[in-house]
Image (spheres, rainbow, N blue to C red):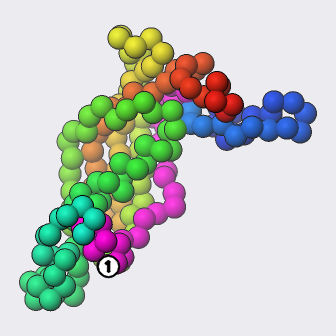
Amino acid sequence: MKESFNFLREIEKDVYVETVGIDFEDFEVGQVFEHRPGRTFTEASCTNYALHSFDLTPFITDQVYAHRVYGSRTRVLEIFVLSAMAHTTKTFGKVVANLEMVDCELQPVFVGDTLYFESEILSKRESKSRPGQGLLSIYSRAKNQHGEKVCSYKRTLLVYRKNFGPYEAAGY
């Protein structure tokens, strides 16, 4: 494994400090990151998400309607799937911002499905306007427990370069 991917660095003999994320320079085009563990969507989590976001979509909030119209399989709100997938940004750690999300494709996800997420680095370049940051173009996808792709999109991340950002001053 690449040394830059280690989550601890030795600051003196047998003394380690936890690190956060990967520096922009350490990403390479073609790298694939598997985001684990998977995410299982339960009926309770879907209902809770819908109610907290004030989404009154009946196939989530009205189970009588949902079972009458959709049968025994309850669908997961698409925005809940996208939110779970966007959380994969955490893997990269030193992300300043998600700048865009394009070419989104969605297939139905149902209560009880477990999704597994992957992200592939498509391209990278230094920022022209922010010398301490770089841009990564990433293709992210989610597959269910059967290996079927249920969501994908391309996104652009703004990422801190080595020795920039708040990390060293904060002690990590």
Query: Residue 81: x, y in percent?
Result: 29, 59
Amino acid on which disc 1 is placed: Glu
The residue at 48%/15% (across/down) is 132
Can residue 76 be seen here? The reply is no
View extreme (right): residue: 13
Tag 1: Cα neighbours inside 10 Å, few (<14), some, or many (≥20)? some
Q: Which residues are magenta?
A: 23-50
Quarter of the image containing the N terminus? top right
Between 137 and 22, the one nearer to me in the picture: 22
Residue 61 is left or right of residue 111, and the answer is left
Q: Indicate the quadrant where residue 77 lies.
A: bottom left
> Which type of secondary structure does the marked residue at label 1 adopt?
helix
Query: Residue 152: x, y in percent?
Result: 28, 50
> Taking 122 as reference, is 74 above or below it?
below
> Taking 133 as reference, is 10 above or below it?
below
Residue 66 is left or right of residue 86, and the answer is left
Query: Residue 146: x, y in percent?
Result: 37, 70
Q: Indicate the quadrant where residue 156 lies.
A: top left
Between 28 and 92, the one nearer to me in the picture: 92
Can residue 18 be seen here? The reply is yes
Query: Residue 112: x, y in percent?
Result: 35, 77
The residue at 50%/44% (across/down) is 91
Quarter of the image containing the C terminus? top right
Which residue is label 1 attached to?
Answer: 43
